[in-house]
Image (spheres, rainbow, N blue to C red):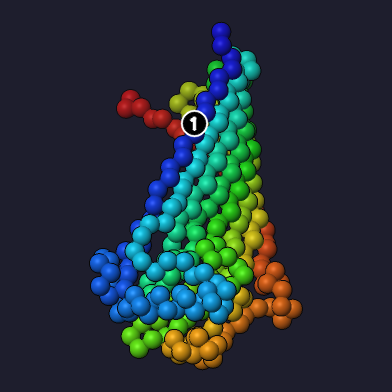
Amino acid sequence: KDKLFFYGAYEKYEGVDFNDRGAIGSGAVNEVLVTQAELDEIAQIARDVYQFDPGTSTPGTIDFEDEKYIGKLDWYVTDRQRLALTYMYNDSTNATPSDGENIEFEFSDHFYNRGAELNSYIASLYSDWTDNFSTEVRIARTEVDFVQVPRAGDAFGEIRVELDDVDIYLGGDDSRHANELEYTIDQFVARGRYHGGSHTITGGYEREAYDIFNLFYQHVDTEIRFDGIDNFRAGLADRVYYGNAISNNEADIAEAFEYAINYVYLQDEWQGNDR
């Protein structure tokens, strides 16, 4: 009789996000009140004066992917005991606009990559000790790392060029300069079930322990606003925003904390009859 079984699956999806915004006359689904000549001029200044390539300003596509796989091992230790081991992985990101209102336009590298990476590990032991009494013991860990990363990287802050009818954005979005969230959940379950006559008694103990890291602060890589294209070319800023910890180390802004939830329970299910 077979006692060991393995199951595995892999899936990868590659697609595109569509940027449907463009200048007046571009034929974009959503045209913004700015000319292509103005956008080209801003891009050229960014490259020549600031040595920064802001990406494209025309409608187009941005690649994304979703990858996942799972592996499961079932071992029938005896006729009355089964050990199950499961591993799951998922990594998915997509390009997300930062400033997409009607009075705003952003170059493609002002988008940010948003998604999450997940790793899950589960080990379960199922035991039938008698015909009436069974137990389950489970240990599990889930690790999640959320991603919100500027497509422009973290070496160049946010630039905002204010025109008469629209604000133009390039560089890393100000809300993604210091933006990290990750957590780990450790779970333990031990429960037993007894069937006796018209009663089913279930009791057990469960624990969930959380370990969380959270970092968020705006303008860590600076936001600079310019009143018009000429001032952008000349380097004459209208406003400059910078935010950080007093130590000037963004890690000091982060919060790391832990907590746990414990459950103890006992339940009696009674099946009545009509006699």
Whole-percent x, y for residue 79 in the image: 59, 14
Q: Please tell me in which quadrant of the rendered image residue 108 appears.
A: bottom left
| Residue at the spot of label 1 | 9
Is 45 or 23 nearer to us in this picture? Answer: 45
- At x 46%, y 74%, the residue is 43
Whole-percent x, y for residue 103 in the image: 34, 80
- At x 55%, y 19%, the residue is 5
Q: Amino acid at mark 1?
A: Ala
Q: Is residue 212 left or right of residue 36?
A: right
Q: Please tell me in which quadrant of the rendered image residue 255 appears.
A: bottom right
For this orientation, the residue located farthest to the right is 247
Q: Tell me if residue 59 comes above or below residue 2 in the rendering.
A: below
The local crowd at label 1, few if under 14, some if 14 to 19, many if 20 or more residues have their Cα within 10 Å, is few
Q: Tell me if residue 155 comes above or below residue 38 in the rendering.
A: above
Specify the quadrant that holds the C terminus.
top left
Q: Secondary structure at mark 1?
A: strand
The answer to whether residue 187 of the structure is visible from this angle is no
For this orientation, the residue located farthest to the top is 1
Q: Is residue 109 left or right of residue 255?
A: left
Q: How many marks?
A: 1
Whole-percent x, y for residue 95 in the image: 45, 59
Is 235 or 99 nearer to us in this picture? Answer: 235
Is 101 or 38 nearer to us in this picture? Answer: 38
- At x 49%, y 49%, the residue is 92
Specify the quadrant that holds the N terminus.
top right
The answer to whether residue 167 of the structure is visible from this angle is yes
Is 141 or 113 nearer to us in this picture? Answer: 113
Q: Tell me if residue 215 comes above or below residue 208 in the rendering.
A: below
Q: Please tell me in which quadrant of the rendered image residue 243 appears.
A: bottom right
Whole-percent x, y for residue 179 in the image: 58, 66
